[in-house]
Image (cartoon, rainbow, N blue to C red):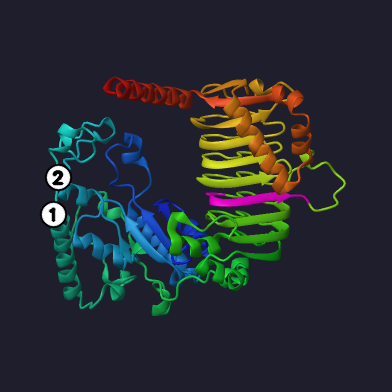
Amino acid sequence: KNSNPESRISVKLVSEVGVGTVAAGVAKGHAEMILISGYDGGTGAAPLSSIKHAGVPWELGLSEAHHTLIVNGLRSRVRLQVDGSLKTGRDVAVAAMLGAEEFGFATAALVACGCVMMRDCHTNKCPVGVATQDEKLRRCFSGKPEHVENFMLFVAEELRAIMAFLGIGTVDQLVGRSDLLAQDYSVRFWKSVKVDLSRILYKPDAPEEEMRCTRGQEHHLEKALDYKLLPQVEMAIETGEAVVAASPIRNSNRTVGTIISNRIARKYGSRGLPADTITLNFKGSAGQSFGAFTSKGMTLNLEGEANDYAGKGLSGARITLKPFSGVSYNPAENIIGGNVILYGATAGEFYANGRVGERFAIRNSGAQAVVEGVGDHGCEYMTGGRVVILGPTGVNFGAGMSGGIAYVYDQSGILDLNSNLEMIDLEPVSEEDDINELRGLLEKHLQYTGSKKAGFIIDNWRDCLPYFIKVFPMEYRRVMGKMSREDEAVERALLQDN
């Protein structure tokens, strides 16, 4: 919510026994919309066990969630949505009477577009061109937006007729009116006569404003630290004039910098601001997601320590962590940041004068970082960027790493034992470009954090360089080799033309 205050937070729950309790917890966690998803419908590519035996009908889960939220005084805070092979206006009417305000259509809309339910979505051989990248098969697609539009109009027309019959003027008036439903006892089947729907059709005794979403959630975003800093940086966002602001920080201050980044992104998009336009200096212990999604032009300097997810989704900013001034311990041997730092980062810089936790830089696709030790699963699923680690790594390093490069200062000589070698190669740092890149990152790390370890390595460069190991993904090497061959082919063709 901090990354985009105007967004709506939605949580999907599978219709299942006890889903009401989960829905109540989600509502207390300030979700704004809860989706109750029934066991029916879904993609044709799902395994048979998921199609036939996952969850229960949406009617059961929806009524339970609706009743539980009312009993706990939470129903007025959230909107309820339902899906699970809704097909007709009658389905929508029943869903509304059981408590839903929004209704999801997928399978029926796909059929309106021409889907014949071949369940070949995962084979790339959809015969009607809906779920395939095969150009020949895609030419078979005959669906048009008007087909879905007409289908939804028919659904709305049937719903309108049902509401008119019931004397209901709007869908809002229909929500939660389970008293308008009754069990059909005319169906004389030996199983149906024993079915008791009274708990599903029960209408809780509650005021009308507590039967549906009438007031929404209170997120208390105005208490976020960013809103205290915004007056100091608004002029910089508007004009691009550099500004420096400082503030103490506590671990209750989460996603610091994200709301400011949102203002930058709304005005400038991914282009952001010039480097160091907004510099924020903090001192203390930062809460979760410090600097998450922060944009180009922002610099966040923290003297102290950070919790998990620092730099999550980093989008161009620079984040530096360094210990409190005057500490007596060796920062290179102590933790300064939590787990899952730089998760999903796309651009920017991160420098930490100390070690960080597990799953560092997983799914990093473009940021560069220097830290002085990591926990288990470092650089997992990394696809781009540059990472320098000036200390030990935990186990399973580089698992699923398909891009980017990591340089590890491996004095103990056990990196190969700690690495997952299925997709990566380990080799010395010997090429001039790699050496220059590595040294440049270390010099920045020294400049921004004052790292004594980086200073020692730079001062003893010739002796320390042999301890560095380059972690090079095999897939990245293959792609780079292919690009090099293509470049060579282009150069040969140009020479021949000349």
- State how far apart marks 1 and 2 are (Cα): 9 Å
Q: Secondary structure at mark 1?
A: helix
Q: Quadrant of residue 163?
A: bottom left
Q: Quadrant of residue 330?
A: top right
Q: Single out the residue that lies furthest toward the right.
A: 328
Which quarter of the rendered picture does the C terminus lie within?
Answer: top left
Q: Nearer the viewer, residue 60 or 45?
A: 45
Name the residue tied to disc 1.
147
Residue at the spot x=35%, y=61% of the render?
81
Dominant secondary structure, magenta: strand
Q: Nearer the viewer, residue 175 or 415?
A: 415
Few, some or many residues within 10 Å of mark 2 (<14, 14–19, 20+) = some
Few, some or many residues within 10 Å of mark 1 (<14, 14–19, 20+) = some
Expressed as whole percent of the image width and height from the top left, the position of residue 466 reads: 70, 22
The image shows residue 395, relative to residue 154, as above or below, that is above
Asked if residue 82 can be seen in this view, the reply is: yes
Expressed as whole percent of the image width and height from the top left, the position of residue 188 reads: 19, 54
Q: How many numbered discs sit on the rendered protein?
A: 2
Q: Quadrant of residue 372?
A: top right
Expressed as whole percent of the image width and height from the top left, the position of residue 244 reads: 65, 64
Q: Residue 320's mark?
A: none
Which residue type does callout 1 highlight?
His
Which residue type does callout 2 highlight?
Gly
Q: Nearer the viewer, residue 49 or 245?
A: 245
Q: Is residue 120 left or right of residue 490?
A: left
Residue at the spot x=37%, y=67% of the render?
202
Q: Is residue 279 left or right of residue 454?
A: left
Name the residue tied to disc 2.
114
Residue at the spot x=62%, y=46% of the render?
350
Residue stretch in magenta: 312-323
- Is residue 485 within the magenta segment? no
Q: Is residue 159 left or right of residue 293?
A: left
